[in-house]
Image (tube, rainbow, N blue to C red):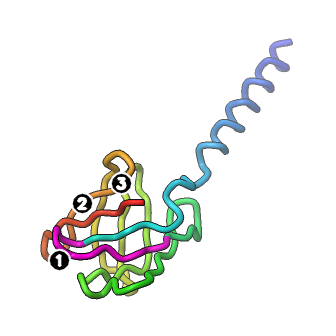
Amino acid sequence: MTKLNSLILGSAFAVGLIGLAHADSAITGAWKLSVGANDAPCVVTLTADTDSAGTATTSGDCTNGGAAVAKYKTIGSKLLLTSGNGELFAALLPKGDTYAGTRVSDGRAVALAR
């Protein structure tokens, strides 16, 4: 009976870990990206390539505010936005339904909102 209980407990634990390993689907989709307080937001669509990273495609004029974002990666609750050459654009933390942080190059405020 002990072997059976161990098998059941181990199986339940493994299924739980598999569930935790899936990507957070709440991060994918269309977001409004704004850089600075006075810049008009543009639309950035995040598409998952792996469980914790993916591509970011922009529509509209995202280069006006200097938002050259091509990829994203999540590390814990932090969302890292990078350019096409892999240079870090901004590190954002969740704040309610949005993500907020600063741009690495000049410290301007960056926000992602639905």
Q: Is residue 2 left or right of residue 61?
A: right
Q: Amino acid at mark 3?
A: Thr
Q: Is residue 16 above or below residue 77?
A: above
Provide the secondary structure element on which disc 1 rests.
loop
Q: CA distance from mark 1 to mark 2?
A: 12 Å
Q: Is residue 79 above or below residue 20?
A: below
Tell me, for residue 101, which label it has, or none.
Answer: 2
Provide the secondary structure element on which disc 2 rests.
strand
| Residue at 36%, 77% in the rendered image | 42
| Residue at 52%, 54% in the rendered image | 26
Q: Which residue is mark 3?
A: 98
Q: In this orientation, which residue lies closer to the viewer: 111 or 39?
A: 39
Relative image position of residue 103 (x, y in whole percent) = 21, 70
- As for residue 38 lying within the magenta part, the answer is yes
Q: Is residue 108 left or right of residue 40?
A: left
Q: Is residue 70 left or right of residue 3?
A: left
Q: Which residues are magenta?
A: 35-45
Q: Is residue 63 above or below residue 41?
A: below
